[in-house]
Image: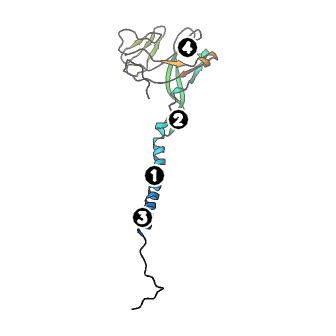
Amino acid sequence: MLMSSGANPASPEPPRRDFFRKTLAIVAGLLAGIIPGAAGLAVLLDPLRRKSAVSTFLKVTTLDAIPSDGTPRKFQIISDREDAWSKFPNTPIGAVYLQRQNDQVTAFNVRCPHAGCFVDAIAGDGFHCPCHNSRFNADGSLVPGSVSPRGLDELEIDPIALKNGVVQVKFQNFVAGTPERRPRT
């Protein structure tokens, strides 16, 4: 049998090309999976990356709305609240007692440091927690014999806004049942 000189049987591809093609297919497949996976992971972890709104002052009331004789008055704290991916505008997030003597204002969180119950203000006599009978003086300090581990949690007031007649409070809740004051996260 004679073979014609122009006919060349199909020659196999060199192994280098096959290796390069397989490597390129693996890299393309990994990129096609990693990029959407990273985007999904970023969306999933987004609520953990957000900063808390605790570091800002929230407007509570005007200075004129608080009695100047030191009688505590309860005010709701209204703010925009975010829970994971949901946003709730103008939602009550807590409450404070405000006391004013002259132009000095003090703010206390309404939650008892013992178990987190709401305390009641007693005119001229401080505060009382109805859950476990803890008592607090008008300055928020603990009355001896109370079961609460610490006095009422005082909150920071914006001094610049106060000079302009507006009461703004840096509102936050604290861990109940501990002698040290630790903010809740």
Between tags 4 and 3, which lies in front? Answer: 3
Between tags 3 and 2, which lies in front? Answer: 3
Residue bearing the label numbered 4: 105
- Dot label at residue 34: 1
Amino acid type shown at disc 3: Phe
> 39 and 113: which one is in front?
39
Whether residue 30 is situated above or below residue 83 in the rendered picture: below
SS under mark 4 = strand
SS under mark 2 = strand
Q: Label 2 vs label 4: CA separation?
A: 29 Å
> 157 and 135: which one is in front?
157
- Quarter where residue 112 is shown: top left
Between tags 4 and 1, which lies in front? Answer: 1
Q: Label 1 vs label 2: CA separation?
A: 34 Å
Callout 3: few (<14), some (14-19), or many (20+) C-alpha neighbours within 10 Å?
few
- Dot label at residue 88: 2
Amino acid type shown at disc 4: Val
Residue 84 appearing in the image? no
> Are the two marked residues, 2 and 4, in contact with CB atoms closer than 8 angstroms?
no
